[in-house]
Each structure stands twice: as C-alpha cells, then as structure tokens.
Image (cartoon, coloured by chain):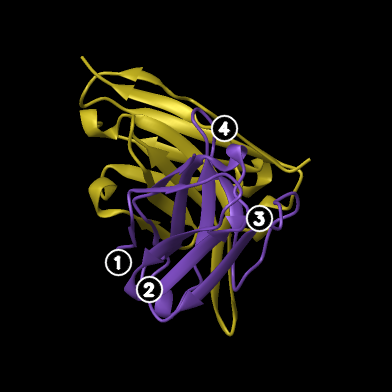
Chain colours: A yellow, B purple
Amino acid sequence: EVQLVESGGGLVQPGGSLRLSCAASGFTFSSYWMSWVRQAPGKGLEWVANIKQDGSEKYYVDSVKGRFTISRDNAKNSLYLQMNSLRAEDTAVYYCARENDFWSGLYYYYMDVWGKGTTVTVSS
Amino acid sequence: SSELTQDPAVSVALGQTVRITCQGDSLRSYYASWYQQKPGQAPVLVIYGKNNRPSGIPDRFSGSSSGNTASLTITGAQAEDEADYYCNSRDSSGNHLGVFGGGTKLTVL
C-alpha cells in the first residue's frame, strides 16, 4: 500500500524549533519530488516547500525562506522539514505529499499521495 | 510568484451539475489539479491533467481548461460531494514552486 506518515508535530514556543518527518512506503521514494503543504486552522491549503528526487533542488514559499529547511534521506525513505524561528502564524496541520510533474502537451503537476498530517502549534 | 483565484463558496441542488473555477496565469502553461477535502481529513486528488481521475474517483467528476481558467465539474452532485475543493498548479515563475487556490466551499442543498 502506498503510504505517507507524518510525525514530529507538537506544541512549541515562538522562536523555537521543530523537525517534522514523513515516512514513505509502498513506492520508490527516490523517484519522486516530495513536498510539504500546510493548513492553518480554518484556512486553506498552502504549499510550503518541495525537494527534487536527489535533493539537489529545493524550493520554498517566501514566508518560510531562511527559517525552514526541507531534506530527504532516500536510503530511509524519509522526508523532513526542519522548522526554526517558529512564529504563531506557522501554526497548522503539516502534510507531506508526493508530487508528479511531467509534460504532455501542457505541463502536468499534481500531488497524488498525501499523509494524514501532523499538527504544529506555536504558542507561549 | 503566482496566484490562483477561486470563488469562496458555491452551492448546488442535489443531483444537479456544478462547476467550480480556478483562474491564474500559470494555468496557461500547467494543467490544474483538483483536491477534495472534507472536515478533519487530508486532501484527496480528484482530477489531474487534461481530465484524468485517479482510481476510485467517481466519473461524475471531470475537469477542463481554457486559457487561464480551469474548471472542475460535478455532474449529478451527491450529498457526499459537500466539501472544500482546491485547485493547484506550479508557480509561473519557471521554478518548481507550487501554489494553491484559496478553496471553494461546496454546499449540496
């Protein structure tokens, strides 16, 4: 079964750090771009960051640049998100997702596998 | 950066057809993908590409695209289709950033 399972969420004070993990199974993890998506309470989905198959390219939404770092360990089939200098506005459910991106007339881009999410709460 | 714009809310009578739209410059280069999210659950991919449904998604869901606008159509809406729907695409900057629309709350009357 294709599966993504996030962990590492919790309550952290403003300015603190947290490391999220995402364990992948049931597919060849090293063949896919992977991403983190978050959802603040009562709000919509926000794309946060993604990473290329070999980790050589990483992209971030402006609001987390310089504070969050995405990484992966293909030997462990795992995706990570190191979150530093956390702010109240980072409070959200964080999902990891598998990306697909290819060209066929137009570019196809979609996230076909999602984890159930892990909750991060930044509060004093 | 790029933005995708969706209507915040749409309603449809049970069994009728509803279209949810998504506008953005990046949609001239990328097909939108569409996700259904019910309260307390993770998003589920319902449409990707030109008009592709993942396994298990009912055929009442379909997608289309024209210019900078993508549409998700539900033909014969069911009570269980009541949910939030999000469109998604790459950013139009040329880098591999992603972007989501603000979401559309679908109410089935």
Circles 3, 2 touching at the beta carbon (< 8 Å): no
Alpha carbon distance from label 3 to label 1: 28 Å
Q: Both on one chain, marks 1 and 2?
A: yes
Secondary structure of the residue carrying tag 4 is: loop
Circles 1, 2 touching at the beta carbon (< 8 Å): yes
Q: Mark 3 belongs to which subunit?
A: A
In depth, the one of A24 and B76 nearer the eye is B76
Q: Say above or below: A7 vs B109.
A: above
Circles 3, 1 touching at the beta carbon (< 8 Å): no
Give the tally of numbered discs.
4
Alpha carbon distance from label 3 to label 4: 21 Å
Q: Both on one chain, marks 3 and 2?
A: no
Q: Is residue A85 in view?
A: no
Q: Amino acid at mark 2?
A: Ser
Q: Both on one chain, marks 3 and 4?
A: yes
Name the residue rendered at 54%, 72% in the picture.
Answer: B64
- Mark 1 nearby-residue class (10 Å; few <14, some 14–19, many ≥20): some
Name the residue rendered at 54%, 46% in the picture.
Answer: B36
Task: Indicate left or right for A26 with A106 as reference.
Answer: right
Alpha carbon distance from label 1 to label 4: 27 Å
Q: Determine which residue is flagged by label 1.
A: B2
The disc at residue A116 is: 4
Secondary structure of the residue carrying tag 3 is: helix
Q: Quadrant of the N terminus of chain A?
A: top right
Q: Amino acid at mark 4?
A: Lys
Residue A85 percent across, percent down from the top left: 23, 33
Residue A82 percent across, percent down from the top left: 39, 37
Q: Amino acid at mark 1?
A: Ser
Q: Determine which residue is flagged by label 3.
A: A30
In depth, the one of B14 and A97 nearer the eye is B14
Q: Determine which residue is flagged by label 2.
A: B26
